[in-house]
Image (spheres, rainbow, N blue to C red):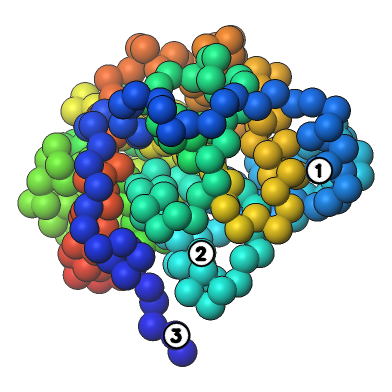
Amino acid sequence: MRKPISRRDVLRGAATLAAGAVFAAPARAAAPEPTSITPDLVAAATKEGKLVFYSSMDLPVGEKLGKAFEAAYPGITVQIERSGSERLFQRVAQEFDSNIHAADVVNSADASHFIPWKKSGWLMPFVPEDVAKHFPDNYRDPDGMAVTTRLWLSSIAYNTNLVKAEDAPKSFADLLDPKWMGKMVKGHPAYSGTIMTTTFQIVRELGWPYLEKLSKQRVMQVQSSTDPPKKLSLGERAVMADGNEYGIVLLKEAGQPVEPVYPTEGTPTISGPTGIFATAPHPNAAKLFQAWLHTRETQQFFVDFTGQYSLHAQVQPKAGRRKLADIKLMKEDPAGVEAMTEEIKTRYARLFRV
């Protein structure tokens, strides 16, 4: 069996990014000129006829996007390869190590993955016109290697059938109350990019002693960040210690007995960038997909359908949903995640015995 490839095997040393931003924003000398969707690009993509998308998006989300793209551009099929971000990172590293180049486009829930991928020369520079016009500089790579397609949160939540609003936790500190022993569920940072990023932000803000205390609460451990909302809605646990907030929002809108909580210490924030591999077997289809994915129309559809957030300046939040500006957020730091990934995996496994 092949030994798992760590980030340090891919990239020795850490890159530096500004805390609170996904991509540093120096001068844009290296970025290519923005590309619009033209008949020539569509024709070239249609001739290739296929797109392979490696994605950490929830499978129904990825499939919905794939079907929408296929409907917009008949003759191009989308193959979705979905996995947790940390598993996806391993797969990409192993494939490149074996000179296998199957993927065209990649989206990860762990923005730090794009640091070694860029350093290793694995990404193709490409700037969609909408990205150049409507996305903030600090959420697009200055060399055009990637752009943040989606933004979401990892919140606390509770089952309203099992917990009264006045008794619900209001903070991460509240999760240490003995009354929640054996009643919580959370995701795993070795599988989920969302939980990896969340764990980093919690360790930075609250320290390892907090997680050590939480680990003694007999927390149900699941893999993906999509799992805790489901366990909560089924009543298998009363409280969600982490997991994706959009899952809770969508379940609540569907009439399920769940309620999100935005911790007083701040809510962890996660970015999901998308990039094109330099070795993409279908480069024109990849460019067309990347450009289409970041149009106002697709981004609006994405927000409305998934409950996540878009950085496209023309996209509007769906009525009735909480706005990011109204939530106290923890700051992102992909370079910090990159530097601490192995430590987080090791210490977390020891604390939670998983």
Q: Earlier in the sequence, mark 2 or mark 3?
A: 3
Q: Residue 164: image x %, image y %?
A: 36, 28
At 47% from the left and 31% from the top, the residue drawn is 31
Q: Secondary structure at mark 2?
A: helix
Crowding at mark 1 (Cα within 10 Å: few <14, some 14-19, many 20+): many
Q: CA distance from mark 1 to mark 2?
A: 23 Å
Label at residue 26: none
Q: Is residue 47 left or right of residue 269?
A: right
**Above or below, 76 relative to 353:** above
Q: Residue 128: image x %, image y %?
A: 61, 27
Q: CA distance from mark 2 to mark 3?
A: 14 Å
Crowding at mark 2 (Cα within 10 Å: few <14, some 14-19, many 20+): many
- Kind of residue indicated by mark 3: Arg
Comparing 348 with 197, the one in front is 197
Q: Secondary structure at mark 1?
A: helix
Q: Earlier in the sequence, mark 1 or mark 2?
A: 1
Label at residue 92: 2
Q: Are marks 2 and 3 in contact (CB under 8 Å)?
A: no
Residue that lies at the very extreme toward the front in this rendered image: 29
Crowding at mark 3 (Cα within 10 Å: few <14, some 14-19, many 20+): few
Label at residue 45: 1
Residue tagged 3: 2
